[in-house]
Amino acid sequence: MSKSPNILWPALGGTALVLGAAFGLMNRDYAGDRIEALETRVEAVSAQASSAAEQAEAEAARAAALEQQVAEVQAAASVMAKGGSVTAPAPHRDGRYGLGRAAYAEEIAAWDVDVLPDGRGLPEGSGDVWTGEEVFVEQCASCHGDFAEGVDNWPVLAGGFDTLADKDPVKTVGSYWPYLSTVYDYVHRSMPFGGAGTLSADETYAIVAYILYSNDMVEDDFVLSRDTFMDVEMHNAEGFVVDDRPELEYAEWRAEPCMENCKEEVEITMRSVFLVETPPEGGSNSVMNEAAVDGLPSFTSEGPSFIPAAAPTPAAAPAPVATPAAASEDDAMLKQGEKVFRKCAACHAVGEGAKNKVGPQLNGIMGRTMGSVDGFSYSDGFVEANAAGKVWTPEEMAAFLAKPKTYMKGTKMAFAGLRKDEDLAAITAYLQSFAE
Amino acid sequence: MDDAFKPSRRAFLRGSAAVAAAGLAGAAYANGPDPLITELQDWASYTGVGVDETPYGMPISFESHVVRRNVEWLTASPISSINFTPIHALDGTITPQGCAFERHHSGAIELSKPDYRLMINGLVDQPLVFTYEDLERFPRENHVYFCECAANTGMEWAGAQLNGVQFTHGMIHNMEYTGVPLRTLLKEAGAEVSRDKWVYVEGADASSNGRSIPMEKALDDVLVAFKANGEALRMEHGYPVRLVVPGWEGNMWVKWLRRIEVTDMAVESREETSKYTDVYADGTARKWTWEMDAKSVITSPSPQMPITHGTGPLVISGLAWSGHGRITRVDVSKDGGITWETARLGKQGDTKALTRFYLDMDWDGAPMLLQSRAMDETGYVQPTKAQLREKRGENSVYHNNCIQTWYVNAEGIAENVEVS
């Protein structure tokens, strides 16, 4: 409000000055006309004054509104500063919300099976090295190899001692794992791949005993149990330090960085090993990059040492063609079969370009003689079935997949079996849909 | 331009940059009136598709190359594997769920909300079981966070390997999560919350991936999340519930979260001993390296995003992030680290979230060695590869946050290189 008087007074003062001048001129002959003119002028000036007053009032009102806005913003800021903003974190309650229900002891027993480094959580049971070898060959060897040496890209479990400081360290249970508890815990909960949670405590103890034996960490008469667990010494138990980046790295790397003339000259010392093609259908193909670093410019603060000549312009490559969406196969059975097949996909491939994986490829399996896929090494049972000329039919397949180990004694397939009839029907229909 | 690194395709691009009139940018400068303007086009005359044509929409067909991609030979089986976010083709900071990288140890599982159970047990007053519905009744929060696999850029320890930012830096995504703070659930069960306690979290899939989280972090900003970018989590990201561990390595963001156990020591599970630990030159290993240090990379130009418009205005764009808080500054070098200039942040960085940066320049057609260098609110400056190797050697596999270099030649083709 302080603004209005300042604006108003100069306008009123001007009016008084004009009125004083008007009285001095009244004695003249032409006074009549003049007075009339002056009266008109006075009216005009008065009007002007009152309009100035109005304008001043309007400006004052606007100033007041602005001041109020400032006050509102300040009030909001102060609320936010006190943590009472409109974007508050989820509130705390003093008491419970009373949500969820008490867990049953059986539920905790079913899910809480992890094992701590000091052995807490280990179940009753035991397993020896030789039983372990049998179980390992049946359950694990298809990926990890008979001697835990690893097949293809699957993890190597044994050996690798004294390689941790080498260029490509071999990190195995023997050379790297610091705790035995981890081996039991992982094998028991997460293995075998595609059949997790199916190993008994005894089988797990036996497998772990065999892995230790493969690493020359125990003798062949060793029996692993809760009681012998802490006797095993892990080679790399002392090989780990807790994160020390704060002392070794952060302390050094929290400094204002260089902005100019940070180096004299920069050279390209290595080019990408792989070029990567990204085809329209997805995925990628890695192609060795034959290009050498020779002939590339080096850089100084003046810029590149030279500009390499452009390669000759070649013919344009065809634009990638978008793959049309596959016609939707509205066959519920096949769809269901495809879903069931996910249980098999860890070890088997089917469809175009399917190759043998841990298990044989399955194209054209229906009507085919058992154990007849080229390049796959079958268990004795399938070798015999092949010699006897047994053929895969939907019925045989369903019987096999219901209980693999009962149907085919000694099969290497670690799959426990499908329990539901509709799953068996779906998977056989699905497999039947793939021709040779 | 996505398959630009195929030799024949690369060659084609060299041509298109030189002959501006035939290229993408050329049309607007064509000789004479542009038929796209002067002639009536089908789309301007016939009607388009109606509503509900795609009840849940996919990107238009022209963008079908912007997809996650894997590198088959990296892993033994696609069921226990990883693919990469197409960060070269995205802008802004939010990663759409449909192209956000996947990492599974035993495949992505279909677990429905009615079948979902979450157990809290261990050192608690009352072990509890929650249904999905229960979780939606606790007060919840919204936060944007990046999730980076500890192995992102891991190949590059051994030098420049894969030619594409999708493959060198694509094990990252950034989403807005909705979820319940873990501390709320711990409190509900009456957990012991002293600093020497741990929270062991475990997934419901066959890998049963489990990690130990120190109590201090568990009480801080960890979320039990059920929505990402406003919609339900995707199957491949842990539907219906995953853990969000802001700023910490992706392996700890347990998907299909089924159990939270309060313990008095770290479980030392497979994923926190034999994996995700860093082996140094002398063979000793560093463990519990949870935070992802500040890192940045230029996403365009990059090997998958060559400069196709010739000289003149050029937008250099990239991403920066830090597991220690906000990104405060990003510097860009065009000469391999001799000279640096400070880039413009697309918007003020959120804590532990991706921040977009830009450097707008006029390109004169000279070759460049492009690098970016992030700084976070702790003052930490992203190190060079040489600095990292000096501290850790070359066998670390994980936690490589080095400065990345792209060599951009005179034709605008970019390549992954290592520099002196």
Image (cartoon, rainbow, N blue to C red):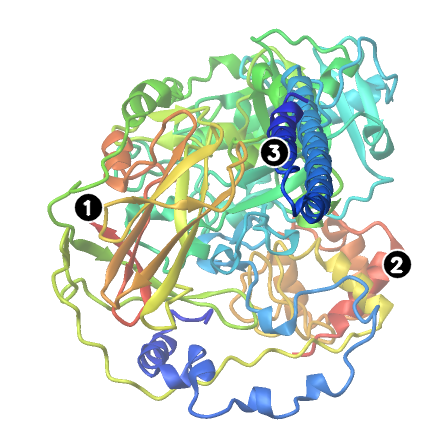
Q: Can the viewer see residue B204 in this picture?
A: no
Label 3 vs label 1, nearer the camera: 3
Front-most of residues A84 and A54: A54
Kindly state the secondary structure of the residue where label 3 is placed. helix
Q: Nearer the viewer, residue A424 or A166?
A: A166
- Crowding at mark 3 (Cα within 10 Å: few <14, some 14-19, many 20+): few
Residue for badge 1: B338
Task: Give the label, 2 or 1, closer to the camera.
Answer: 1
Residue assigned mark 2? A422
Q: In this view, does A93 lie to the left or right of A364?
A: right
Q: Can the viewer see residue A286 in this picture?
A: yes
Crowd class of label 1 (few under 14; some 14 to 19; many from 20; radius 10 Å): many
The chain identifier of the residue carrying mark 2 reads: A
B117 or A8, nearer to the observer: A8
Specify the subunit that label 1 lies on. B
Q: Earlier in the sequence, mark 3 or mark 2?
A: 3
Check chain identity for marks 3 and 2: say if they share one: yes
Please identify the quarter of the rendering in which residue A106 is found: top right
Q: Calculate the distance from the C-alpha at mark 3 to the C-alpha at mark 2.
A: 119 Å
Q: x, y (%) of residue B167?
A: 44, 55
Q: What residue type is labelled 2?
A: Glu
Outermost residue to the front: A29
Whether the residues at callouts 2 and 1 have beta carbons within 8 Å, the answer is no
Residue holding disc 3 = A24
CA–CA distance in space, label 2 to label 1: 67 Å
Quarter where residue B21 is shown:
bottom left
The foreground one among B316 and A100 is B316
Horizontal relation, residue B265 to residue A429: left or right: left
Element type where label 2 sits in the image: helix
